[in-house]
Amino acid sequence: MPYNWMKIHSSPAKQRRDEVKDKSKNKGGRLCEGQIFFDADGQAYALVQVPDDPQERQQLIADLGATSVLGLVDADEQDGGVAPPPSS
């Protein structure tokens, strides 16, 4: 199952984390480590294990309001030749 680092809206921090966790779960994904992360500028990022289905993945990205997305695969997927989901 692929992953996306998503740049998301951030406030309030704990409430936003819980929203991302719930929305991810409801759409067949998973908020990794159950946490969102913040950079020095206060911008929030979430690592989300996303659904394999491209339409479901896009719906989750839209529901989370991601402003940018970096598609990733894990080491096993990389060694198996699985391509990461598209970035935007």
Image: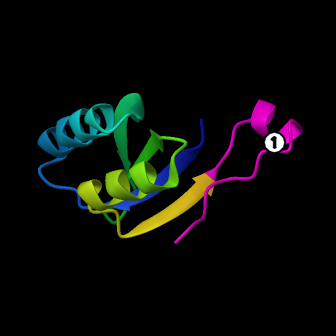
Q: What residue is shown at x 68% (from left), y 53% (from top)?
A: 84
Please name the amino acid that badge 1 sits on: Gln
**Position of residue 44 measured from the top left corner of the image (x, y, whole percent):** 33, 55
Residue 80 is inside the magenta segment: yes
Is 48 or 16 nearer to us in this picture? Answer: 48
Disc 1 crowd rating (10 Å Cα; few below 14, some 14-19, many 20+) is few
Give the dominant element type of the magenta stretch: helix, strand or loop: loop
Residue 44 is inside the magenta segment: no
Magenta part of the chain: 72-88
Q: What residue is shown at x 55% (from left), y 42% (from top)?
A: 52
Q: Quadrant of the N terminus?
A: top right
SS assignment at label 1? helix
Q: What residue is shown at x 64% (from left), y 50% (from top)?
A: 72
Give the color scheme: rainbow, by chain, secondary structure or one colour. Answer: rainbow
Picture quadrant of residue 31: top left
**Position of residue 24 measured from the top left corner of the image (x, y, whole percent):** 32, 38
**Position of residue 46 measured from the top left corner of the image (x, y, whole percent):** 40, 47
Give left or right: position of 26 versus 84: left
Is residue 44 visible in the rendered image? The answer is no
Is 56 or 39 nearer to us in this picture? Answer: 56
Is residue 59 visible in the rendered image? The answer is yes
**Position of residue 22 measured from the top left corner of the image (x, y, whole percent):** 22, 33
Task: Name the outermost residue toward the top.
Answer: 33
Q: Which residue is mark 1?
A: 78
State whether residue 84 is above or below residue 66. above
Give left or right: position of 45 versus 26: right
